[in-house]
Image (cartoon, coloured by chain):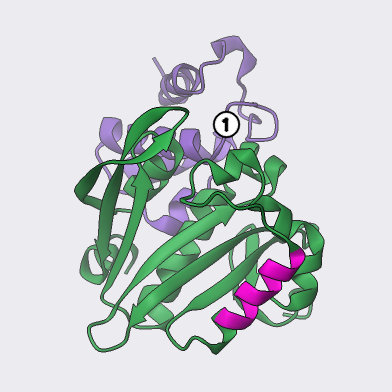
């Protein structure tokens, strides 16, 4: 894995590794200020390098979170992050989320699908979890499509939880269990 | 209609591009509307039409139209 130093997992087009404070000085911290990214996140505040480093240091100390940077294999460009958070080691579940922050990667690639698939694989095969929870805003058809393709089932929805472009939007909750995933991927 | 043409017709409709603009070499970099969402929509459409299920690795393995056609052929014909 010399081409992918400190790789946690290598996929077809992406490789994942732990992030360091120097990563925060790249484009990463700008993603969460980007309107196209921020509109699908329940946050409003602009991001900074300092905030990004604080987040990273906090995540490193959290035994119930796995945060990984996603890099494309061609250029090793940092294009997104994947996370498994609120990991419950007793009952074997976690909350999964991804962000494809790089604009070109978001608009002209299938990296969103691959990063999500890699995080699912890590959850079930590396961490031995039994269930993954997730969610998407109802109007976010891209997230909905990716989660559905990977086998996530809609469980329910919080009604009118978000206000996007002045329109109220539901927060749809999804779940994927290990057995269902193994049926397709075992 | 051949399976290849059937799949390319389906892709053109889902990607919202003229059929003539698609070839076996078409991929997310050459078709502006081909992003992760459209990719998954196309994969789920072929799953439903040809009645099979794809693994995550199979979904990610498709990087252009030719690979999607080949994958469908492999899943249908074994």
Quadrant the N terminus of chain B occupies: top left
Residue A107, x across and y down, in percent: 63, 37
Check the image and report above or below for A12 versus A38.
Answer: below
Residue A130, x across and y down, in percent: 26, 76
Instruction: Tell me, yes or no, whether the highlighted magenta stretch contains residue B51.
Output: no
User: Which chain does the green colour mark?
Assistant: A
User: Which chain does the purple colour mark?
Assistant: B
Task: Report whether A109 appears left or right of B42.
Answer: right
**Residue drawn where x is 28% and y is 30% of the image:** B49
Q: Nearer the viewer, residue A88 or B32?
A: A88
Dominant secondary structure of the residues highlighted in magenta in the image: helix
Q: Chain of mark 1?
A: B
Q: Which residue is tagged 1? A: B34
Bounds of the magenta segment: A49-58
Instruction: Tell me, yes or no, whether the highlighted magenta stretch contains residue A53.
Output: yes
**Residue drawn where x is 60% and y is 10% of the image:** B20
């Amino acid at each position: 894995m010399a081409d992918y130093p400190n790789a946690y997992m290598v996929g077809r087009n992406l490789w994942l590794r732990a992030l360091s404070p120097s990563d925060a000085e790249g484009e990463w911290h700008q993603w969460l200020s980007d309107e196209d990214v921020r509109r699908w996140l329940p946050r409003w505040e602009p991001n900074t390098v300092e905030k990004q480093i604080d987040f990273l240091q906090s995540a490193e100390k959290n035994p119930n979170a796995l945060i990984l940077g996603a890099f494309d294999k061609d250029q090793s460009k940092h294009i997104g992050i994947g996370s498994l958070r609120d990991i419950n080691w007793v009952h074997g579940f976690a909350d999964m989320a991804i962000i494809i922050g790089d604009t070109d990667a978001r608009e002209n690639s299938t990296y969103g699908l691959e990063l999500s698939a890699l995080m699912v694989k890590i959850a079930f095969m590396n961490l031995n979890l039994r269930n993954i929870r997730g969610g998407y805003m109802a109007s976010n058809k891209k997230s909905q499509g990716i989660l559905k393709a990977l086998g996530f089932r809609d469980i329910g929805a919080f009604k009118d939880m978000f206000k996007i472009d002045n329109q109220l939007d539901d927060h749809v909750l999804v779940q994927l269990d290990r057995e269902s995933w193994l049926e397709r991927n075992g | 209609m051949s399976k290849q043409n059937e799949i390319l017709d389906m892709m053109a409709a889902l990607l919202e591009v003229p059929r003539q603009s698609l070839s076996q070499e078409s991929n997310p970099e050459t078709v502006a509307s081909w992003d992760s969402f459209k990719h998954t929509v196309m994969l789920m459409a072929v799953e439903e039409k040809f009645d099979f299920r794809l693994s995550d690795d199979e979904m990610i393995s498709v990087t252009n139209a030719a690979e999607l056609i080949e994958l469908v052929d492999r899943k249908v014909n074994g």
